[in-house]
Image (spheres, helix red, strand yellow):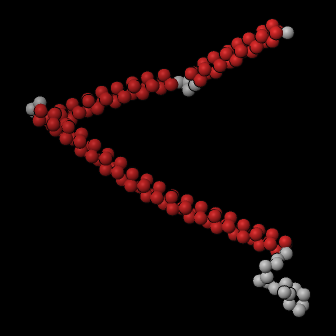
Amino acid sequence: MTPGNGTQPPDSADKSLGEIVSEVSEKASLLVREEIELAKAEIQQKVGRLTKGAAIGIAAGTFAFFAFIFFLHTLSLFWFDLFDLSQAWMGYGITTVLLLLLGVLAGLLAFRFIKRGSPPMPDLAIEQAKLTREALEHQTIERDQLERGST
């Protein structure tokens, strides 16, 4: 069903191969562009959520820090009342000494862990690789001996 001038109508199902390839190429290009836009929108949404989460996390950390300071004040006043000290600064001194002792202990533990971890070599993996190599070499030697014995 062609019109009188011999050309195919545009809505005809009989399209040329070139037209079909061109249409598929355009639609594939459009699909790729839309997928890229979707990915951008998704990344922007996730970055926004991460930013909000980080800001709220910083606020929570700030509140926890101030709560810790008030806890230390409370602890100092507790020592003052517990030991019936004559001056409040003595309670603060006890708290300071306890914090220094905890800091020294944590520092020594950190030094110990760092010393045990240095240098960062995978000693167990290296040892296992040596054992595997020895086992493979031993199998090769046995196989060579079996082949010589059978000939």
Give the quarter of the figure containing the N terminus: bottom right
Residues 12 and 58: in front is 12
> From where the camera sits, is residue 27 visible?
yes
Residues 137 and 125: in front is 137
Give the quarter of the figure containing the C terminus: top right
Instruction: Indicate the position of residue 65 as horizontal and vertical percent values.
Output: 32, 45
Q: Going 70% across and 17% down the picture, which residue do you hit?
A: 136
Instruction: Indicate the position of residue 32 as horizontal and vertical percent values.
Output: 68, 64
Q: Locate residue 89: give its quadrant.
A: top left
**For residue 143, side relative to residue 90 (left or right):** right
Find the residue positioned furthest to the top: 149
Q: Going 64% across and 67% down the picture, which residue do you hit?
A: 34
Q: Going 16% across and 38% down the picture, which residue do you hit?
A: 77
Instruction: Indicate the position of residue 80 as horizontal and vertical percent values.
Output: 14, 35
**For residue 29, side relative to residue 15 (left or right):** left
Instruction: Indicate the position of residue 73 as horizontal and vertical percent values.
Output: 21, 41
Q: Is residue 131 above or below residue 29?
A: above
Residues 31 and 115: in front is 31
Residues 145 and 102: in front is 145
> From where the camera sits, is residue 87 visible?
no
Q: Going 63% across and 17% down the picture, which residue do you hit?
A: 131
Q: Is residue 132 above or below residue 80?
A: above
**For residue 19, side relative to residue 47 (left or right):** right
